[in-house]
Amino acid sequence: MKRAGEQSSKGAEQTKERILAAAAKLFDAQGFDGTTVRQIAKEADVNLALISYHFKGKKGLLELLIASYYETFFRLLAKQKAANGEMDPLAELLSVVRLYVYFQRDHAAVTRLIQRELSVESMLAREVMTVYIHRWKYSFSSIIEDGIARKLFVPVAVDQVLLAMTGLLVYPYLNPQAVREVYYLEPGSDEFCEWLIATVEQLLRSLLVPSLSPSSP
């Protein structure tokens, strides 16, 4: 039999999850500034005071959503790397691309929220870039640099390659409505995810993999 304290702790966690889900939904639909704590409480069906109690207000909610997003991704990445073992750099790079594409798709609301916040000059954006974006970048750049060092990739400007790759990866999940209404594609579908992964693979192969010299006649 569970003790009262255990039940209470489980209930508190469920309440926090409801609040976080409500905040993600409303921040995505209305923006951070356009959403009130009262609206979040109503959406989550909780007492208004619980948001201050658990998260110290609206800003605390936003910070936790962002931190949880990246920490979850990095945890999945570490787990994937441990399961895959040693891989050649291109295969490893593409495995990270695949993980990130589906991660964005499965966390669409928070993905859009974060990218919108990063587009605005603010203390929060600088903190996110310092703590998480540089770490995210390293997840890719370290693989490319290893491939170059092992002469499996051509020498390239790594930051430029990553910028081109990031544009492909991020745009469909930052602007899903445009992808649907202008390009008539569904970024939430498995088919789109697989197409995007294949497209990024083509880009990376063209930029990183040495081309074979033509055979002599």
Image: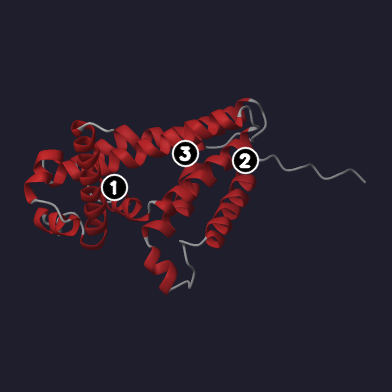
Q: Residue 118 got which mark?
A: 1
Q: Which of the two discs, 1 and 3, labels the residue nearer the N terminus?
A: 1
Is residue 105 visible from the viewing direction of this image? Answer: yes
- Disc 1 versus disc 3: distance between alpha carbons? 18 Å
Q: Residue 15 got which mark?
A: none
Mark 3 crowdedness (10 Å alpha carbons): few <14, some 14-19, many ≥20: few
Q: Position of residue 180 (x, y in %)?
A: 43, 70
Residue type highlighted by circle 3: Asp
Mark 2 crowdedness (10 Å alpha carbons): few <14, some 14-19, many ≥20: some
Between residues 87 and 155, which one lies in front from this camera angle? 87
Task: Say which of marks 2 and 1 sits in front.
Answer: 1
Residue type highlighted by circle 1: Leu
- What residue did someone put label 2 on? 208
Residue at horizontal 48 percent and vertical 50 percent from the top:
102
Of helix, strand and loop, which one carries label 1?
Answer: helix
Q: Position of residue 204 (x, y in %)?
A: 59, 45
